Structures are given as structure tokens and as C-alpha cells.
Image (cartoon, rainbow, N blue to C red):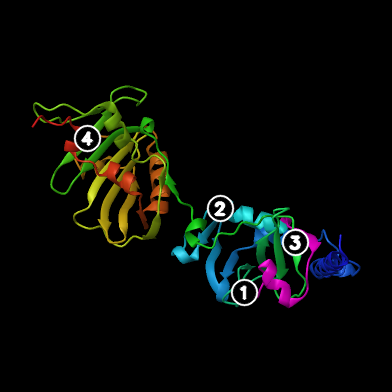
Amino acid sequence: MTQRGIFVLGLTALALMVLALVFTGQRSQPELLDGEPLIPGLHGLVNEIDAIDIHSAGGVTAVRLRRDRERWRVEDLHGYEADFRRVHDLLRALAAASRAEPRTALAEWYPRLGLSDIEDPDARGQLVSFPGRDLPGVILGDRDQTTGGRYARLSGTAQTWLTDQPLDLPEDHMDWAERSVMDIPAIELAEVTILHPDGDRVRLRPADEQGEQWVLLDLPEGREAAPRWEIQPVTNGLANIRFERVRPHSETPADAVRALYVTRDGLNFVVNLFADEEGNWAHFSVTAEPSAVRDIGDVEVTAGADEQRLLADAAAVDARLSSWQFALPERKFGLMTRRLEDLLVAQDS
């Protein structure tokens, strides 16, 4: 190796040593001992936290989470119910996160770790704060490619840290909502009716006790029902419903399609379905009153043996759903608004 090559390697080694010192900080200082909680005091307050804000670049408050009694809600979605598990996992991860390794305390190095002040319009990190609590906010920066932990810095402090947690933090408030509306498979239903404003009606009932075989009622003279594989998806209209957007319920358009799903234990799910420029919407109401069924097609239904239990169940589910309109995926919306002709064997032209 030439003398010049040795000199270059020497400069490189020196530069790496300087960088190492900058990013590891001064380990000899007792206040920088690693292994301490990332957010002091959070662990003992996890069950008392009732507000979380997530801020993004430019100081924008991207997500506001608030706890109402036992439920977390997304303020940015008109207070709709939050995904409890996601909020719980965030709090648990933040409370468990420790200062695994100290990094730089020099502000000019913050951008390299994604830890610039959140007011910076070019900031890559996220600030998590706890309104109403005497707890420091924490800026979460880039993820370390080796350990998977995120870099972090407490608000108002200079020292940065590598944490031992990945601390995933979506900035879209929709990702914090409880997207699952309901999941009632066809085997739990006793009747499905779809009524269109022009009088077109689809009526389906199970042909066996297991609810696995369904028949199409009110066949027009000389027509034949479509194969089972075309009918069965319609009976699963309430199965695995997840919304794309949600908004408070205001009014139902006069031209809405009305669908009824009657469960085997006597609950009646009435769904008003309509489309506008913002999406394909569904509004749910739930009752255990047999008279509610006659309103959309004279379908005879018995409320069940334990009417008080049914009424209580219906009231609880209705309270959760009836104040909202849910934007459904196009395929799900299409299944819930089928016409009779869609479920008949096509006629020869």
C-alpha cells in the first residue's frame, strides 16, 4: 500500500472516530446511563392517560385520541371509536421503551436521525404528547436498520437516544379508527330482504337448519334462480364489514335501497344504502321489534323467547351504529344492493 493510501485510511479512521463520539455522547455522565425508561413516569400512568396527540412536520396535529369512559375515540373523525388495541399497544410500547443507547446531543446532527424539532416543515419525525398530563412529549425519529428500534428525543432536551422499541405510529387518523363494523355470517341469519325504491325486491331464506343452503323466494313465472355460488355472497352482506370512511348520520335519501337482515335469535338489522359524490354509504339501525320488519316487506319474524335480552342487545348495537354513515367498499355495497334480476338465470335472447 502506498504512503498516500495509508494517509487516506488514517483520515477515514479519524473521521469515523469523531462520528462515533458524536453519536454515542458521553457515556461517563451518570444522567446518560442507558436502560432507563424513555419517558419517565409514563409506566405508572398508563391506565390514567386519557388524551394522546400525534404531531407531524410543521407542528401539525395529525391525530388526536381521547378516551371517553372505557372507549378511545378519534377526535379527527368526529369522535368515532378508535381501535382500542392499537391505542393500547402504543401506550404499552411507549411505557416499556427504554433508552437503549445514547446518541448525539448536538442539534446540527438531529436531522440525520429524523429528530429535528417538529415545527420544522422538513421534519421526518413524529411528536407524541399527552395533553393534561405532567409528562414530556417525545419525538420519534428514524428506525435503526440494525436493531429495529427508533431514535427518540424528549421535548425540550438535547440528548437523543436509540430505543429498544419499533414504535409504529400511523399519521393517518383513519388508521386509528375501529374499522370493523360487524361480522355476522350467513349461517347466523334467518332471512335477507333487499327492497329497491321502485319496488324490486330480493328475498332469501335458508333451506337447511345449518343456514348453508339458501333459496330465492318470489321467482317470476318461468324464471330460474341463479346457481348457489351467485346467491350465497348476497346472504353474507353483514359478514366482515369494514368501512373506508365514516361520517355522522344526518338523513337518508328518499331513493336509498333498504336491506333487512334478520338473525336467527331475532335481531333485525335494517340497512339504508345510497351513493353520493363521496362514496357508497350504509346506515345501520338495529331493533328486536317484529313490527320494524313489516315496514320493508311484510316479512313475518318472531322476536324470540327472551325478548328483554333481545331488546337490550338491539339497543346496545343500535347505539353504537345508528349515529353514523359508513362508506363501504364497492364490492360489498354491490352485494347488499342486488336486484332480483341479478339472481336469476339469464334468459335466452
Q: What is the three-letter code of the residue carrying label 3?
A: Leu
Q: CA distance from mark 3 to mark 1?
A: 18 Å
Secondary structure under tag 3 reads strand
Residue hosting label 1: 118
Check disc 4: other Cα within 10 Å, few if <14, some if 14-19, many if 20+: many
Cα distance between the residues tagged 2 and 3: 27 Å
Disc 1 and disc 2: Cα gap in Å? 26 Å
Dot 1 or dot 4, earlier in sequence = 1
Q: CA distance from mark 1 to mark 4?
A: 57 Å
Residue 18 left/right relative to 240 = right
The residue where tag 4 is placed is 203
Q: Earlier in the sequence, mark 4 or mark 3?
A: 3
Residue 110 counted in the magenta span: yes
Q: Secondary structure at mark 4?
A: strand
Contact (Cβ within 8 Å) of mark 1 with mark 4:
no
Q: Which residues are magenta?
A: 96-118
* Label 2 secondary element: helix
Residue 10 position within the rendered picture, expressed as x and y whole percent measured from the top left: 87, 67
Q: Which residue is mark 3?
A: 162
| Residue drawn where x is 16% and y is 49% of the image | 197
Secondary structure under the numbered disc 1 in the rendered image: loop
Name which of mark 4 and mark 2 comes first in the sequence. 2
